[in-house]
Amino acid sequence: MALYEYHCPENGRTVEVRHGMDERVDTWGDLCTRTGRDPGATPTDAPVERLMSTAAVGSAGRAGPPVGGCGTGCGCVAN
């Protein structure tokens, strides 16, 4: 599962949701259903735009190899 960020131009809100890469979220109603939020005054058929995605975090707490660090090759990770 990947974490996706969707923006609704109709209401200006941006929401994160985790779903499979083969799944689509096209409307504010779809997004609200998946995240359990109330659509409020925004029409449920209002389109949403996917902004970005990140890999799902595994059991070790990281999505992939460490990034950053001190640059000496020691394996430390900058926070």
Image: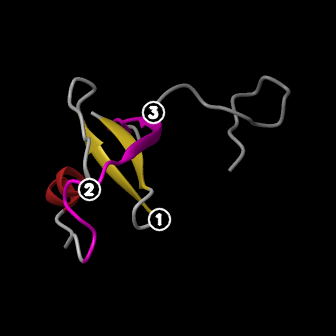
User: Counting other residues with Cα less than 10 Å from the Cα at mark 3, is it few (<14), some (14-19), or many (20 or more)?
Assistant: few
User: Counting other residues with Cα less than 10 Å from the Cα at mark 1, is it few (<14), some (14-19), or many (20 or more)?
Assistant: few
What's the CA distance linking mark 3 and mark 1? 29 Å
Image coordinates of residue 2 in percent, x first then y, are: 34, 35
Q: Which residue is mark 1?
A: 12
Residue type indicated by callout 3 = Ala
Whichever of labels 1 and 2 marks the residue nearer the N terminus, that label is 1
**Callout 1: helix, strand or loop?**
loop
Q: Which mark is residue 63?
A: 3
Task: Indicate whether residue 36 is drawn in magenta.
Answer: no
Q: Residue at x 22, y 59 (%)?
A: 35
Whichever of labels 3 and 1 marks the residue nearer the N terminus, that label is 1
* Up-down relation of residue 38 to residue 74 (above or below): below
Q: Which residue is mark 2?
A: 28
Q: Is residue 11 left or right of residue 59?
A: right
Q: Is residue 30 left or right of residue 63?
A: left
Q: Which mark is residue 40?
A: none
- Residue range in magenta is 41-59
> Which color scheme does this rendered protein use?
secondary structure
Q: Is residue 66 left or right of residue 13?
A: right
Quarter containing the N terminus: top left
Residue type indicated by callout 2 = Trp
Q: Residue at x 21, y 60 (%)?
A: 32
